[in-house]
Image: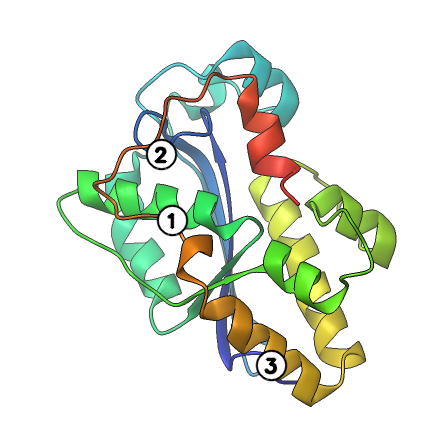
Amino acid sequence: MSLPEKLAIVDLETTGANPVHDRITEIAILRVEDQQVVARWESLVNPGMPIPRMIQELVGITDHMVADAPAFAELAAVVRELLDGCVFVAHNARFDYGFIRHEYARAGGEFTAPVLCTVWLSRALYPEHHRHGLDALIARHGLQCTARHRAMGDAEALWQFARLVSESVPAERLAAAVARVMKAPARRSGRAGSASPASPPHSYAAFRHRSG
């Protein structure tokens, strides 16, 4: 086993790659305790800004779809409850973790959690491979993803990856890899108040979905 006992597997869709300037459009969370999914939750989110056309075409979430969706501030309490006490798990976790921290900061709060990035976990466990983006993991491990680039579809694929490594990697090796990845602060996002260079819309796909 050797994965943390409580995991929150998180995937977001957003208006772009920069958590300072962009916003969340969809969020999915799988809360896992003792290798069992105990909560499965997803919601569209009104970003309060237009979604660039390129991202609408890539992800399939349109301005019309989010027009009547709740803002993140309206979802903050339920999101915090789902994440509470868990290791925050995401693919290219600095992206998702950074957006969540910035959204809580905008809502007048803060959020911190231990973070496990599955890009870096894959690199640690399978160093013979050069590609560790989600598409590469899906192809290499035969993961099922019925809704690629949608939050719950991608979160479900990550949960399959987590189960696969917990069942196929020797416990001591997996535990060591998890500990090493979780100790690396540079792989987490910076502070919620910190800025990063503005990212043009075309960089979103490369940063968000193909990292690794």
Is residue 173 visible in the rendered image? The answer is: yes
* Residue type, label 3: Ala
Task: Check disc 1: other Cα within 10 Å, few if <14, some if 14-19, many if 20+.
Answer: many
The residue mark sitting in front, 2 or 1, is 1
Task: Check disc 3: other Cα within 10 Å, few if <14, some if 14-19, many if 20+.
Answer: some
Locate residue 21, reporting x and y percent. Answer: 32, 25
* Residue type, label 1: Ser
17, 36: nearer the viewer: 17
72, 167: nearer the viewer: 167
- Mark toward the start of the polypeptide (3 vs 2): 2
Most distant residue in the left direction: 108
Question: Which label sits on residue 189?
Answer: 1
Report the coloring of the rendering.
rainbow
Task: Check disc 2: other Cα within 10 Å, few if <14, some if 14-19, many if 20+.
Answer: many
Most distant residue in the bottom direction: 172
**Count of number-bearing discs:** 3
Residue drawn 60% across the image and 52% down it? 155
For residue 47, side relative to residue 90 (left or right):
left
- Asked if the residue at tag 1 contacts the one at tag 2, i.e. Cβ–Cβ closer than 8 Å, the answer is yes
Question: Which label sits on residue 19?
Answer: 2
Residue drawn 45% across the image and 64% down it? 184
For residue 57, side relative to residue 135 (left or right):
left
**Looking at the image, residue 30 lies above or below residue 203:** below
Element under disc 2: loop
Locate residue 183, reporting x and y percent. Answer: 44, 70
Residue drawn 20% across the image and 44% down it? 105
Is residue 74 visible in the rendered image? The answer is: no
Residue annotated with mark 3: 176
Element under disc 1: loop
Locate residue 180, reporting x and y percent. Answer: 53, 73
